[in-house]
Image: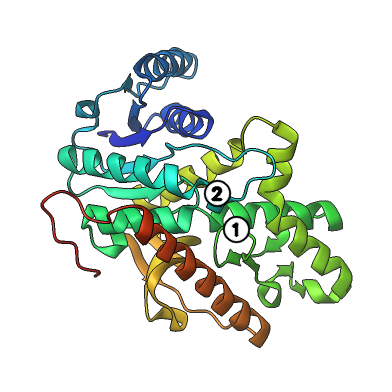
Amino acid sequence: MSRVKVTIVGAGNVGANVANILALKGVFDVALVDIDGDLAKGKSLDIQQQCALVGSDSRVEGSNEYRITENSSIGVITAGITRKPGMKREDLLKTNAQIVKGVVENLKKYSPDMTIIVVTNPVDTMAYLAYKVSNLPRNKVIGMGGVLDTARFMYFIKEKLNVSYNSIKAMVIGEHGDGMIPLISLTYIGNKPIGSLLSEEEIDELIKRTQQGGAEIVSLLKTGSAFYAPAMSVVRMVESIVFDKKEVLPCSVMCQGEYGVEGIYLGLPAKLGKDGVEEIVEIALDNKEKEMLKNSARSLKNTINQLNELVSLTSEGNSLPIR
């Protein structure tokens, strides 16, 4: 079986963990790119030597040169500055926009048809930027946010009710930020709706903890943000695409009328397969969730307006219409 090549740009905690998990599976080759070439080379060597212990023949190459990314099927963008205590994801906008723009332009030179997964925050806005700069169709540029938010929501449910993850059905949509929306109306423990097991106050506390889940970790780490759960969230998306699993996962996707939203990236249920986003799945929301989704979309439109003032959304020489 030929291995699938995945490029990861950013050899920090998230990027290196994604590279490590993929390499250990033995079915991926990994190109790890970072502005600090020695960091990328050192981590790639460490990962490859670990592979010897599990019998994985995956090749992991690290460099500060994008030529090693040639012929990649998927590109994962984790490069950028991370949050410090007291910062919101939106505080990263200007710096990370310039970084992501440059990364996308370089990836396109060597793998023009790759699927791009954006992790850099604020992820919904960075995914929009990557989409505009890449000139790829909307199904080929995806943001990672909702998979992670859902994992956090499930953790808090598990801790509260002392149940197995296998018994929990849950999903978080909307922006990857304070306006994220845990879908209470569709949250079940076994065959029981969560509202039959917890009071409204207890559910509100779960929602609040989920919305602040990333900030809680940032405040504890003090020098950075979460990386283990984000990395595994990326791997879940990569595998659904590469192996054509067609899993329905909450991802940041380009909206063209779905859920009444147009022209922005927003976290929604998406079926991921070999063509990237194969379908944005429309599910029934209650009135409160619909209103929250509208507010989330409104917030993201404001952030995109800020982005338009900060950075050119075109590559040199390209005209990039919205698709």
Q: Is residue 5 above or below residue 318?
A: above
Residue 221: give x, y in percent of width and height.
70, 32
Image mark for residue 52: none
> Camera-side residue: 185 or 76?
76
Q: Visible in this render: residue 268?
A: no
Residue 222: give x, y in percent of width and height.
70, 32
Amino acid marked by disc 2: Asp
Location of mark 2 (residue):
91
Question: Local crowd at mark 2 within 10 Å, few (<14), some, or many (≥20)?
Answer: some
> Residue 270, located in which quarter of the rendered image?
bottom left
Q: CA distance from mark 1 to mark 2?
A: 12 Å
> Residue 73, located in which quarter of the rendered image?
top left
The residue lying furthest to the front in this view is: 309
Amino acid marked by disc 1: Gly
Residue 242: give x, y in percent of width and height.
34, 48
> Camera-side residue: 90 or 17?
90
Residue 160: give x, y in percent of width and height.
85, 56
Is label 2 in a helix, a strand or a loop? helix
Asked whether the beta carbons under mark 1 and mark 2 sit within 8 Å of each other, the answer is: no
> Camera-side residue: 164 or 236?
236
For the C terminus, the quadrant is bottom left
Location of mark 1 (residue):
177
Q: Residue at x 74, y 64 (%)?
A: 207
Q: Visible in this render: residue 99?
A: yes
Q: Residue at x 60, y 58 (%)?
A: 177
Q: Is residue 121 above or below residue 203?
A: above
- In the displayed structure, does residue 32 sit left or right of residue 224? left
